[in-house]
Amino acid sequence: MNLKHALAMLGLAGLSALAHAQDPNLARNLAATCANCHGTNGHSVGGMDSLAGETQEKLMQKLMDFKSGDKPATIMHQIVKGYSDEQLKLITAWFAAQK
Amino acid sequence: MFTRRDFLKTAGVAAAGSTTLAGLSACATVGGKSRGHVVIVGGGYGGATTAKYLRMWSKGAVDVTLIERNPTFISCPISNLVIGGIKQMEDITVSYDNLKSKWGVKLITDEVTAVDSAKRTVTTAKHGTVGYDRLVLSPGIDFIPNAVAGLDGNEERVPHAWKAGPQTVLLRKQLQDMTDGGVFALHIPKVPYRCPPGPYERACVVANYLRQAKPKSKVLVLDANGEIQSKKALFTKAFESYKGMIEYVPNSELRGVDAASRTAELEFDKIKADVLNVIPPMRAGNIAMKAGLPLINDRWVDVDWLTLEAKGVPGVHVIGDALFPAPTMPKSGHMANQHGKVAAAAILNLFEGLAPNPTPVVMNTCYSFVDSKNVIHVASVHQYDAEKKQPMPVQGAGGVSMAANELEGKAALAWAKNIWADMLA
């Protein structure tokens, strides 16, 4: 999937999502579901990729490639399909903002 | 007489509704006033995660007291590797020190004897009574008394090793002491039970040890269920790789045991083993009963999935293996950690007068070793369904490994390091 295209679509979807009630900490809460493996706030203690401080574009590209099957994986291709693209955008923005 | 006020002074715990005592603990409370006091019972995967995330997400503004009976955390996941001789107890033991010193969690090493959800107090064996604004019970499981005739009181002779700790050490020792040519019999109860793939992993790592150390021995898997309950095709293949050593017998519900002779009594058969490892039928941890929570099937706690609050018992949240699960949701340490985060987020919202997050997501990953290096996984993602009022597995997401592989062997150990840090570091 073309990343620019994906982000453009997500932008639109994001706007419509804002019309509904959304938890103020939704991105934080969603990102916390990744922490079991990737470390609290995306700081891995080893053996798994750290996500904190990576650019959102890089993280989104990776996740989209897992989703499409372009990037081979043992498990991430299965996990990423459980999240909507809007959710992935929130998650990646949150990790990108972590130091 | 040791009054509640004395206790609060001694322990430095902020009381429910108290403003003067709030923030006495080392944890710097923002603005000097606590936003509330949460007591957590049980410092396993669920409770420890809740404690850390409440402190982290509130930036220290919420006081947290964690009551745990064990002085250190000992992990159930990876404990099968100790039984199989691949890892040692110290490899699965983690200190609670960081929760105290880094996160300002007040830790009480004690047993909870009673919960009064009307007065919002918890009573401990040695540390008196503690008040709370919100209570989180993460009690894990306890075994159903008298479910297997002859078993109660004989757990030294017939270990379960389904709670990591001395039982893990005991089962390892019995396996080491077994003579070559002996029978290691493992009984699996009917679902639901803690850690669906765990018993099958145990059969594999025990066989892995016996193949090297005592190759004439046998692993007999007596499963009360009609088939393998998790990663079936992958475990079937793993069992085949131990041909002649692992024998899998479905529909083998245990009626009783004779502990003295280590005999398993099935409906039509009696099987004498050299090591008899019985995982008994289980239910929510006993404290759920003591707290007077209504149970489904007399076994599991029913919760509101947006807050993890026990239905009909305001202010008492329950997480982890003790829950009546949502569809396809496993009783796992990973899932308990995820419950803990949903509960922490909900509690902080409720303290702020906000509604809980209407769209929580939880996910699960379970790795199982089929020998010392090769691992298989199962994964799933569960999104809250507003109509069904519970998390539902996302169709087309999740799944299992293509085949057992060493890459996931490394991932499994990295998973353990990271989740332990996510809870406790």
Image (spheres, coloured by chain):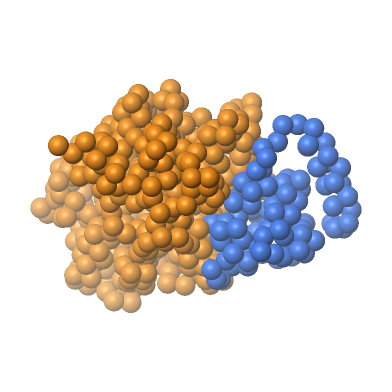
Q: Is residue B78 visible?
A: yes
Question: From the viewer's perspective, is residue B3 above or below residue B403?
Answer: above
Q: Position of residue A39 (x, y in %)?
A: 56, 61
Q: Residue furthest left?
A: B260
Q: Is residue B269 left or right of residue B198?
A: left
Q: Nearer the viewer, residue B404 or B350?
A: B350
Residue A45 percent coordinates (x, y): 54, 68
Which residue sits at x=37%, y=69%? B91
Q: Is residue B262 left or right of residue B25?
A: left
> In the rendered image, which quarter is residue B80 located in?
bottom left
> Residue B415 location in percent, x, y?
51, 63
Of B370 and B324, the residue lying toward us: B324
Tally of marks: 0
Q: Residue at x 55, y 71 (%)?
A: A46
Residue depicted at x 75% and y 31%: A20
- Colour of chain A, in one word, is blue
Quarter of the rendering occupied by the N terminus of chain B: top left
Residue B146 falls left or right of residue B261 = right
Chain that appears orange: B
- Residue, x 21% and y 49% (percent of image)? B264
